[in-house]
Image (cartoon, rainbow, N blue to C red):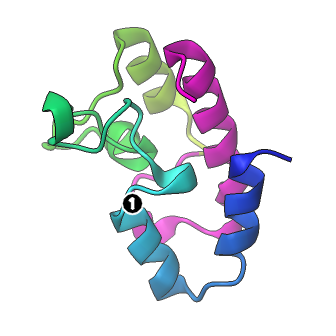
Amino acid sequence: MDQYDVYIEHLKTLNPSEVDEEWNNWRGIFRTTGNNPPGVGGSEYGCLTLVRRNSGYGATAPTPSLTERIQADTRIPKHSKDITPDHYEIFADWQRQIDRELGRI
């Protein structure tokens, strides 16, 4: 069990508006694809949904390859309101992959 599994268990205890608040705060499985939240340390990297949507926000991942792979993953919802508990493990798997690629702890 890792930090994302623990976070998923936490999310399962929340109502939908609280899950949306977690998404808005860039926590756990909803953190950005970079090392910092948007605007912190010059980061403009988006979360998985913003990178997947790629609409006007200019949200990307730290590498073109990672951006392309996220945008190609049709399992990732394009809008936070479409996220359901069925998506949690998909988000966690992506965060684990990003952790490995970027050396995030």
Q: Secondary structure at mark 1?
A: loop
Question: In the depicted view, which residue is nearer to us: 61 or 3?
Answer: 3
Q: What's the residue type where badge 1 is placed?
A: His
Q: Would you place residue 90 above or below residue 25 in this image? A: above
Q: Position of residue 5 (x, y in %)?
A: 77, 54
In percent of the image, x 62 and y 18: which residue is there? 100
Which residues, given as a range, are shown in magenta? 76-105
Q: Residue 29: where, in percent of width, then height?
A: 57, 51
Q: Quadrant of residue 35?
A: top left
Badge 1: few (under 14), some or many (20 or more) residues near its Cα, within 10 Å?
A: few
Query: Residue at the spot x=70%, y=49% of the render?
Result: 3
Q: Is residue 35 above or below residue 32?
A: above
Q: Is residue 41 visible?
A: yes
- Towards the viewer: 103 or 87: 103
Quadrant location of the C terminus in the rendered image? top right
Q: Main secondary structure of the magenta part?
A: helix
Find residue 90 and report its horizontal and vertical position in percent: 68, 45
Count the numbered circles shown. 1
Residue 86 visible in the current orientation: no
Q: Is residue 12 left or right of residue 15?
A: right
Instruction: Please name the residue that numbered disc 1 is placed on.
Output: 79
Residue 85 lies in quadrant: bottom right
